[in-house]
Amino acid sequence: MNLSNEVCERARISRDPRFDGLFFIGVKTTGIYCRPVCKVRLPLSKNIDFYRSAAAAAEAGFRPCLRCRPETAPGTPAWSGTQAVVNRALRLIGEGALDSASVDALAERLGMTDRHLRRLFMEHLGASPKAIAQTRRMHFAKSLLDNSNLSIIDIALAAGYGSVRRFNDHFKASYGKSPREIRGKKGLEKSAELTFYLGYRPPYNWKFMLEFLNKRAISGIEWIADDAYLRVFQLGGELGWLQVKNLPDQNRLVCRVSYPKVTSLGLVKEKIKRIFDIDANPSEIALSLSNDKLMKNVLDRNGYLPVPGCWDPFEVSVRAIVGQLVSVTGAITTMKTLVKEYGEKVNVDLPLTSLADSPEASDVYLFPKPEDLCDIDYQRVRLSRAKIKAIAGLAKAVVDGHIRFDLTMDSEELLEKLLGITGIGPWTAGYIALRALREPDAFLSGDLVIRQVVSSLQKRTALISIKELEEESQEWRPWRAYALMQLWHEANG
């Protein structure tokens, strides 16, 4: 999307929520930066500047608006730049890569010099990696101040600050007030749970997202109940659960998390964002795909559809292997057996009101770790020997560090290593790229259902070949993952 000053000005005047988080407005007369949806009286055009990120506005000396709360805006699209490395760096920063390490260390992980990394960030985001990280920490801290009963110390740790003094100094420099002044005397009810909100840009198809996740939910680990997504997880040896609901009138998700390790809450937040694909820019994606006649007709029927991600890349990779050449229902049945045989059963109280008396709510498991599946036995899981070998090969590769899902490998390198494992072919690698790697251009040209749908839409008498579909899909780049969701949805009616 071409965010020229003219486009930004029109979006500002109309307060268009589709542009929320794509740019920020620095008001020179007040020294404050706002979201384009801010409800305050519109300042004169001559008194404002536009910035591509909140961090860029902060670096220019502006403070966050306390009314529109920039910390609640949708995140910068991870693939907003043309450089794939910007995507990887943003995701690493989101996971806290700069909370305890330097930009030099981040650049080294990405295989480049820190100077080149800084140049890419300035080119695509208008701010340095350090500024992006500082703004991320500050925004998350502000969200926790507003919506949690965590102490100031815990909020500082959760947001990635090494000390409370550093947090207080940075917060006061950013907001002009201390954290205690911002929080005030409002009393938040004591609870073992934490609540925070994640904004998205409309349109967002929550119904589609829940239906997709529900159809593929692993029994004992994930549930779709009470119009919400719920799952258990383990991070850093600590057990937790999360529940996500939609607030459509506010264009945001409300996330409830029960987890004792505050220093990992930022990572939990980033994982939730990836599951629900809320940093995407629907307008840009739909506009690009609509340039193709076939895809335009499909979009007109379905509307924009997000691409569901996953909590754990290894988990969804095993799911992809199990799902080779079988129905979704068949794959989930096998996954249930695999989890019961190799997963760890845990005791946790879940907020499942509609399933409170169901056996599904009482049998709770953690997904098997890679080391648990290195010697998987086909007699216990009733999988083909080929799939057993593929799962064991993947597990061993992860344990040995040959395959890493921590973004230190670029997608091409990771896919190449995945394809080197016996039993993992293009379809499986493509599915992993789609849901685990969050590649916006991932596409399964060998998927039989997709081939059948495209053949039907084009009124072909014969099934389109893989080569022909690959050629056809070039028109949908760089958003083929979103085109794939449209075609799968067509198949399901």
Image (cartoon, rainbow, N blue to C red):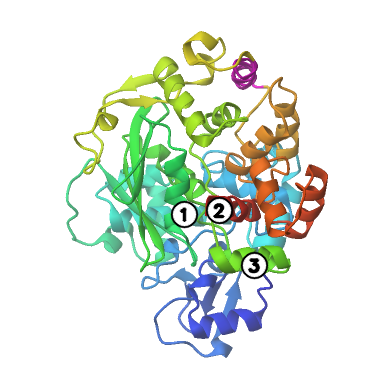
36 horizontally vs 459: left or right: left
Mark 3 or mark 2: name the one nearer the start of the chain: 3
Q: SS for tag 3?
A: helix
The type of residue carrying mark 2 is His
Query: Circles 1 and 2: CB distance less than 8 Å?
Result: yes
Q: Is residue 71 above or below residue 437?
A: below
Q: What residue does disc 3 label?
A: 297
Above or below for 488 versus 73:
above
> Which residue lies at the image location 63% right of the left edge and 29% below the top edge?
404
Magenta highlight range: 386-401
- Whether residue 14 appears in magenta in the rendering, the answer is no
**Which amino acid, by three-letter code, is at mark 3?**
Asn
Give the structural element (helix, strand or loop) at label 2.
Answer: helix
Judge left or right: residue 283 versus residue 216.
right
Q: Position of residue 342 (x, y in %)?
A: 44, 16
Q: Position of residue 197 (x, y in %)?
A: 37, 56
Q: Secondary structure at mark 1?
A: helix
> Marks 3/1: CA distance?
18 Å
Q: Nearer the viewer, residue 394 or 385?
A: 385
Tell me which secondary structure the magenta stretch mostly adopts. helix
Proximity of marks 3 and 1: CB atoms separated by less than 8 Å:
no
Please tell me whether residue 102 is drawn above or below residue 348 in the rendered image.
below
**x and y, in percent, of residue 375 in the image:** 56, 9
In this rendering, does residue 18 appear at all? Answer: yes
Query: Residue at left 48%, top 34%?
Result: 329
Dot 2 crowding, Cα within 10 Å, few <14, some 14–19, many 20+? some
Q: Which residue is mark 2?
A: 489
